[in-house]
Image (tube, rainbow, N blue to C red):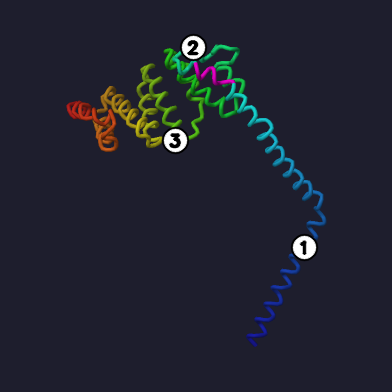
Amino acid sequence: MARRRKDKKKDETLVDIVEARESAAEWLERNQNIVLGVIVGLVILIGGWFAYKNLYQIPRNIDAQEQMFQAQFQFERDSFALALENPGAGYPGFLGISSQYSGTKAGNLARYYAGVSYLNLGRFDDAVDHLRKYNSTNELTAIMKHGALGDAYSELTDMDSAIDHYRRAVRAGDNSFLTPYYMNKYGLALLHQNRADDALKVFQDLKARYPNSNEGINADQYIARAKAK
């Protein structure tokens, strides 16, 4: 008796599966135009994306990189004003590249260069504006972006924002040169704001993590100053 019930239940399950298949087939038959339209649309969308990427975006990025070398040359010579707008030989500066090649990796990098150029020229509001628009792409560039923003805000005497960005630079990654450098600035900014307890933790952490760095070697004097406050 129990075996018959099992066989009957199995037969009902098979019937349900067959009916479901037939129902799906009927649905596809009724809506084949819609299905084909969706498939064709996806093919066009994917094909369009690849065409945009390979025929437009990548060539533009290569062109931007080629256009930027003269501005980079002036930047490395500390000729920041020339690097921004008129690097010479008919090439655009960082401002022109970031505008003309917006949406490319090179155009994005030009924003960082422009921000640092403005920082070195003492135009700190402009530095903040361009650095904030720069999209960091990895650990190293995130450290550099937030460290530079910390410097710009510090020059603008907006110490709360400076502290925030120095903290972000420190937390963005672990670089044996840049991280202790910005940890030191982070601690000094905290001391400047009379946040001695927070500064003490930063300098103690700096000494423990990077004892052989210049900042780690000099950390004791700031630890003593923080304890004295």
Magenta stretch in the rendered image: 67-73
Q: CA distance from mark 2 to mark 3?
A: 28 Å
Q: CA distance from mark 2 to mark 1?
A: 71 Å
Q: Nearer the viewer, mark 3 or mark 1?
A: 3
Q: Which residue is mark 3?
A: 139
Label 2, secondary structure: give it: helix
Q: Is residue 195 left or right of residue 153?
A: left
Q: Amino acid at mark 2?
A: Ala
Q: Earlier in the sequence, mark 2 or mark 1?
A: 1
Rendered view: 125 above or below 7: above
Label 1, secondary structure: give it: helix
Q: Earlier in the sequence, mark 3 or mark 1?
A: 1
Instruction: Give residue 141's position: percent from left, percent from top.
Output: 45, 30
Task: Please check the rendered image and state whether residue 105 is part of the magenta-colored stretch, yes or no.
Answer: no
Please name the residue shown 56% across and 26% down the image.
106
Please name the residue shown 32% across and 31% down the image.
180
Q: Amino acid at mark 1?
A: Ser
Q: Quadrant of the N terminus?
A: bottom right
Q: Is residue 137 left or right of residue 39?
A: left
Dominant SS in magenta? helix
Crowd rating for badge 3 (residues with CA inside 10 Å; few <14, some 14–19, many 20+): some
Q: Which residue is mark 1?
A: 23
Q: Quadrant of the C terminus?
A: top left
Residue 50 found in image quarter: top right
Instruction: Give residue 220's position: percent from left, percent from top.
Output: 20, 30
Q: Which residue is mark 2?
A: 81
Residues at marks 2 and 3 touching, judged by CB atoms closer than 8 Å: no
Q: Is residue 218 left or right of residue 70?
A: left
Please name the residue shown 56% across and 29% down the image.
105
Rendered view: 173 above or below 72: below
Rendered view: 92 above or below 103: above
Rendered view: 1 above or below 73: below
